[in-house]
Image (cartoon, rainbow, N blue to C red):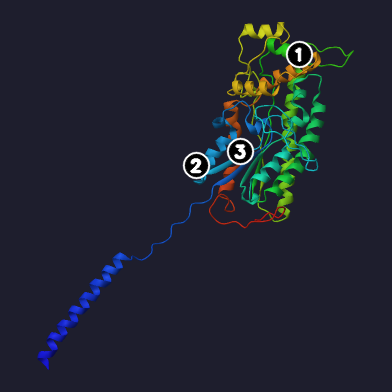
Amino acid sequence: MNAFAYPTKRLLIALAAIILISSGAAWAQNPQPTKTEKPAPRPLNMLVLGDSITWGQGLKDEHKAWHQTKRWLKEATGRDVRERIEAHSGALIGSAEEPRISHARLDGEVNRGVPTINEQIDEALKSYPDPSQVDLVLVDGCINDVDARRLLNAVNTPDEIHRSAEAKCGGLVESLLQRVTASFPNAHVIVTGYFPIISEATTNDFFMRALAKTLYTPAAGVPRMKDKEMRARLIAISKEWYQSSNHWLALATSKVDADLAAQGSRRRVLFAPVSFLPEHSFRARESRLWGFDASFLRKLLVVLTLGNVALRTNDERRNQRDQSCKEIFKPMLGETKDDKRFRESRLMLCRIAAIGHPNRKGAVMYAEAINTQLRPLIADSGWLRDAPRALVAPGNPVR
């Protein structure tokens, strides 16, 4: 019995060893599943609406304020950022009630009132399968509704500019922001402000005096202003524009945000004023605006020939814009002298459209103003984090 049991025991031990070895091999061939890696967060969607300021008139893409904000967001959040640019030079605000017209897509450098900013919203909505996935909207508007040329015409008064700013940068912008927030119900909206064009730091040379006289259009029979009075008026209306536009844009922004808060929304609409000093204005010592690329002799010829010698701008898109303007304002068949004069005037304005817009240093100021408003939002309410957000129907923002 004992003699039989010993080999049987050895056999059982051997069998157990074989089973253990086989199990180990099977374990090695079929390792336990590892933890699934967390999927990469979706890219952030940034939409840019508005006029030449949000477009970045005269700047290469990599120097524009929206592009600088895109880079900053990517670094701050670790997420890719997809931009969609609907803004363009000259855009009017328009109305949500106006009938929609299809407009050819042109170079954004070309100054034109359409598509309006409301029409830009329509185009953006067509491009996003789910508008609630738009995370950030950068928008501005109202200077073209006021008409920027009024800020360079000394016939206007500070009171008139104040009233225009109230009418165009107040209620009109408030209605625009209501539509933006309803159309993109999960997006934070940053509204950027404007700047004074002429200040006491603007160069007071013969060229600026001649330019002021050229743009001055008094009514018939009204005595013309003297140079000193004209300069003082231009400084005053620029200052009034800066203060009034900032005031009404900030008020429109806060009203829309307060209405959303009353519906239970987190903070969504913010105003980004830009701190422009007098020395940052047009043709000042530390100007943050594009100017003219012309020698003293060329400027003199421009004045002496009443504009028959063309001025050139010193922006980065001058050649590209020049070509686009020529394509759009081609001579027409059978045009009259008046038609030709009007077309050439439009062509000239198109070519120098970057004048008085933020240059590279000015764009940095705009980007910093935008990023200052965004910075607290990155850590607030899970925005720009990986936490899922409920998708809502337009008009019903979520906290």
* Element marked by disc 1: helix
Give 137 or 156, whichever is nearer the viewer. Answer: 137
Q: Residue at x 74, y 28 (%)?
A: 241
* Element marked by disc 2: helix
Q: Please, which residue is most extreme toward the left here?
A: 3
- Report x, y in % for residue 213: 76, 13
Measure how far apart labels 1 and 3 are at the Cα level: 36 Å
Q: Please, which residue is most extreme toward the front here?
A: 333
N-term mark: 2 or 3: 2
Is 27 situated left or right of 74 in this image? left
Circle 3: residue type? Ile
Residue that mark 3 sits on? 370
Circle 2: residue type? Glu
Q: Residue at x 78, y 24 (%)?
A: 150
Give 106 or 243, whichever is nearer the viewer. Answer: 106
Q: Residues within 10 Å of mark 3 (few under 14, many from 20)?
A: many
Give 86 or 332, whichever is nearer the viewer. Answer: 332
Is 33 situated left or right of 17 in this image? right
* Element marked by disc 3: helix
Above-or-below relation of 175 to 246: below
Residue that mark 2 sits on? 75
Disc ID at residue 289 = none
Measure how far apart labels 2 and 1 are at the Cα level: 47 Å
Residue that mark 1 sits on? 214
